[in-house]
Each structure stands twice: as structure tokens, then as C-alpha cells.
Amino acid sequence: MIDQSTVQRIFDTAQIDEVVSDFVTLRKRGVNFLGLCPFHNEKTPSFTVSPAKGIYKCFGCGKGGNSVNFVMEHEHLDYVGALKYLGKKYHIDIVEEELSPEQEQRKNDRESMMIVNSFAQKYFTENLYQSEEGIAVGMSYMKQRGFREDVIKKFQVGFCLDNWNAFSNSATQAGYKKEFLVKTGLSIDKEKGLIDRFKGRVIFPIHGIAGRTLGFGGRILKKDPKAAKYLNSPESEVYHKSRILYGIYQAKKSMVQNDKCYLVEGYTDVISFHQAGIENVVASSGTALTADQVRLVKRFTNNMTIIYDGDPAGIKASLRGIDLVLEQELNVKVLLLPEGEDPDSFSRTMSSSELIQYIEKNETDFIVFKTNLLLADAKNDPVKRANLIIDIVRSIAIIPDNIVRAVYVRECSSILNVDETVLYNEINKIIHKVKEDTWKKDQRSNLPEDQSPQQFAESSAFLRSANECDLEERALVRTLLNFGGEILFSDKDEAGKEEQMLVGEYIISEIMSDELESVNPLYKLVFDQYSENLKNASFNSKTFFRDHSNEKVSQLAADILSEPHQLSGLWTRNESVIESEEMKLKEIVPKLVNEYKGKKVRLLMKEVMQEMQKAQETKDSDRMMELMKQKMVLDQIKNAIDKELGGRTIS
């Protein structure tokens, strides 16, 4: 773990223009630099680097952040890896905090397991090429499947001899400990000694993003009704099947270049696509798609096409998992191959260009595909049709982007012959429910012990669309970052001592005093951490949030800091612009806060009115009286806020 002083030194030393210019040709434009974005294909430069703000921002694809974010994105490194990269660039010695004995032991065990996996991969590959059995059985199988030798080597395919303990004996003789052979799952500990888990199987090493071997998949070649056709390494400290995708190491560069990822099911599907010249392909290896796997894809592209082999039962079983892709804001399409074909066999029937053309011509938006698939199953059954509509609505509701969601509503309305209003009503119910659930979960005291608010903020994929106060809250965050340290009010006390109220102090005190909380944990995290640092004399909100270790926070800060400071309607009075910046702040900040409070009050009133309607329907007079009192209080608050805003009613 890198100590905080070293992290701060790296941030202070790493100049954003110097870091970016190692990878992008930049030219000066005013106080900034301009270049072609390295994250998407463009002919006209829209990639801007601001040395003064310490950020980069592409106005084409939307990516932005600080120097560490850039290295993470461009070099596909994690946060610590990017810090080490910059430390090396600027000759800064990386000082890591001393680990506890337990942490040190875990780190050493993990590294030992990785070393054992590396030995096993080389051992299995050597068997495939040099052992008599490996050549006769393993290599023959691969050649019969039509795989070229260069592709076999690319994926480091190997073979485990059909012997109970050939590998285990070789590993122990080479000095590898029994403990780590068992922990990796390569060997199984029996009373008579170690036996090989993958005996008699063709071996497919599973690599992490950095190319290290994390685990293995093995395909049995002889007929054995008691043995599984495919066998994977068990879960371990180094291998978590829900967090990795087969082929990600070989695919990541092509995924970035083509801004697309193809998802298939098995190992040989991936290898066949590579042999056909298509490298941006990964496999879930037969497991249900997980949120971690989707986020792994999103590190390289926002576009995914899932390729199915035509088995309707298998497709229906995986539909709910694909909703995760929508929730993570990926553009997902589906390709259904002709009956009897799988990605492996189908990719052999045409060239790479023909295959890409076929995919582009026949792939379908996931929501439309799902609607048509379930509609065919429902036929004229009204109950199944109603369940179908509910299922589709759930999928559409989790799409974060309002525009994309609206397009899907229109298409599904046409396909299902259901009025758009009906679909929107159901979607809004779901979003409202999610908002309420998120609000409850977001209470700091209710967070799981192993999950910080920072981690929770990263897991909230579509809160901007579910947050009805997003516009007002983002405006407050923008004001905190840009003007939080500016003086808002100043006066003298009875002793003649000058007292000052800063913009940040005012906003935070107003939010906290009225116990206003955002349903978006990302905004809440900013408000909370700003509050915690109010008494810190060295606190600089711009650099604090720009250089935040939470990538989502630093991305938010970069987006806000890259926005021009334009006067809104609130910055004008009687159609004339308020000239001095000090006057602008005195005018705008209280209005922003009151706009926010007014919106919150209006939402509370809406909920009270809904409850009153329920009470009226159930003829609950006591509840009705209670709600009427609440409404009277809210009316008073609303009128007071309207008065503060000059009689302008919040809508």
C-alpha cells in the first residue's frame, strides 16, 4: 500500500501535459493543449489538456480526469499501478506502508500461487508439444478442430497427461510446495497423496488483464459419463471466475481500437474468432454474466455484442444477467446464429470481413431482441403477455440515459401494441422504488461493514436518471468546486472583529441544517467529504476532488472543472448581468440553495398528496388529518422559499 505522502508527491509532480504528451501529439491553443483523442477514433481534435486545472477532457467521447486517471485508462492499469508508473517516470521512490503480518502472509501466498500457476502453464504447454501423449492426443484434437499452431501458441494451450499424479510429482520435484498446489486447485490432496485435477485434458490457461495466469480450464477428450466435459480451477485467492473473462488479455487492445467487444460462451469460440482475424472477443466460460465482468469490458469499450448459438432455453436463462450490461451503461446488441451453429463453427465458414459484415447486418438491440423473443413465447396468453410487459419494463427502467430509454419505450410500444404512457407509468414506479431503496441504503449507518460510502458510490449505475434533484445537486457541487473558498458574506461582530462566511461553508451548513441528502451517493460523498474538511486550512476543493482516489469522483470533478462558467438565468436581474463576481456569488449561491430546497419540498408534497389519496380511498380519517398537517407545514416552507426567490415558484 503506497503511503499518502508519496501519493501526494506524485500528484504534485506529474504535469498533465507532460504525461499525456508521451502518448498524444499535443499543440498549444491558448492556455490549453489540443490533440486527437487516444480513446476513440476522430479526425477533428476534441481532446483538451488543461495544465492550469490539471485535467484532460475529450468533448467527443466524454472521457476526462487527472494524470493518474489518464494512465489508468490508456495503459489499462489499476490505481496503484498508475501511481507506480508515474513514480517511475518522475523518479519518485514508491514508499509503501508496512503491512501487518497477516497482510504480508496473504500477499506472499498470493504471489506463490501465481508462480505455481506460471509453472503449470509452461508444464502443460510443453506436454502438448513435446510429450508423446500430448502430441498424439492433445495436439491432434486441436488440429482436428482446425486450429493453426500460431493461434494455439497465442493462447498458450497445453495438455495434462492422463496420469493420476504426473503434474503433481513434477511440481513437487521442482520445489513447489504442496500447500500452493492445493490452494490453486491444480492438485487434489488425497490420503495416498496428491492427484492431478486436470489429468487427461486439453488445458486452456485463463489470463488476467496483465497477462499472468490466474487459473485453468480443461476439456476432457475421452468418453467418461461420470466426468464433466469442461472443468475449471476452483475459486482461490488469485482466481475468481465471476471477475475474469477468458481472452481479455489477448482482446483488450483490439477492443479499444475497434470500440467494440464480442461476448461468446467458450474457450474455443474465442480462439476461432482470433483465427478468423477478429481479436476483440471474450468468453464468460459458461458462467452467468456478472457485474464485475461487465465492468471489466467497460474499461475498454462501451459497446458489446453478445453472440448466441441459437438455443432458446439457454438464451432465456441468460437474459436477466444481461440486464447488468444495460445497468452499467453499455450499448448492448445480440446476434442469434443460424440453428445448429455456434461461434466456433460459424466463424470457420467465412473470412473476417465477411463475418464482421454478417454480425453488423444481423445484430439486434437487446431490448428489441428480448421483446420479440418473449412475445413469441407468450403468443395469445394474456397472463404471459402481462408478465412479458413487466419483464421488459424492468429492463428499460435500469437504462441510465433518458434519451436511450425513450427510444426503447417507443420501439417496445410499437412491438407490444401498448400505449407509451402505460410503459412510462410502470417505468416511473420502478425508478421511484429504486430511488427510495437507494435513499435508505445510502444512510451511512446502514452501509455493510465491508463497504464504504466511496465503494457504494461506484456501484450506483443509474442514479442520475433516478434522481429528480440531479440538476440542482450538480449545480451545488459545481459551485463548491469552483467557488467554495470564496467569501460570500462578511460582517463585523460587536467587538469589531470581522467575521466571514465562505461559499462552501454556507452551502454545507444549509444542506446539513435541513438534513438534506442526495439519493446519488456520488454527490453525497462530495458533500460529506467537503463538510469533513471545512476546518482544514489547507483544503483545496479543486485539487482534493480532482485527485481523489475514487475514479468516479475525479471524473466528476474533471467534467465540472472543464465546463465553462456560463451565466444562467439566475445570474441576471431585470435582464441585466450582475457585474462583479462578488455580487454574482451573493446573488447566485442563496438562490441555488433555495432552488434545491424548493425542489425537495415539492417532491415531499407530491408524496404527501399520494398518501392523502390512499388515505381517502381507505377512509382512514386519522391518517388523513396527520397528512393534512404535514401538507400545511410544507406549504408554509414552500411559500417562504418562493418569497426568498422573489415570488418565483419552483417547478
Image (cartoon, rainbow, N blue to C red):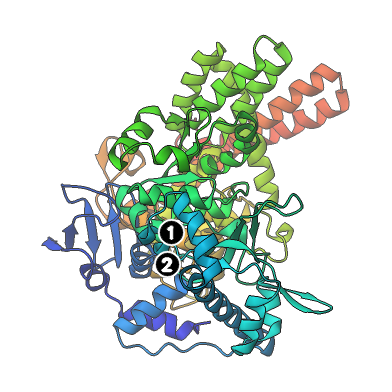
According to the picture, the residue beneath numbered tag 1 turns out to be: 480
Which is nearer the eye, 610 or 188? 188
Residue 476 is at least partly visible in this image: no
Q: What residue is drawn where x is 58% and y is 59%?
A: 243
Residue 290, given in percent of the width and then of the height, sits at 60, 50
Numbered label attached to residue 541: 2
Q: Earlier in the sequence, mark 2 or mark 1?
A: 1
Q: What residue is drawn where x is 45% and y is 58%?
A: 248
Residue 186, given in percent of the width and then of the height, sits at 65, 72
Q: Secondary structure at mark 2?
A: helix
Quarter holding residue 433 = top right
Residue 416 is at least partly visible in this image: yes
Q: What residue is drawn where x is 53% and y is 76%?
A: 123
Which is nearer the eye, 53 or 329? 329
Q: Give the answer, above or below, for where 363 lies relative to 412.
A: below
Q: Amino acid at mark 2?
A: Ser
Q: In the image, 69: left or right of 181?
A: left
Q: Give the answer, above or below, for where 588 lies relative to 16.
A: above
Tell me whether circle 2 and circle 1 mark residues in contact (CB < 8 Å).
yes
Residue 172, given in percent of the width and then of the height, sits at 65, 86
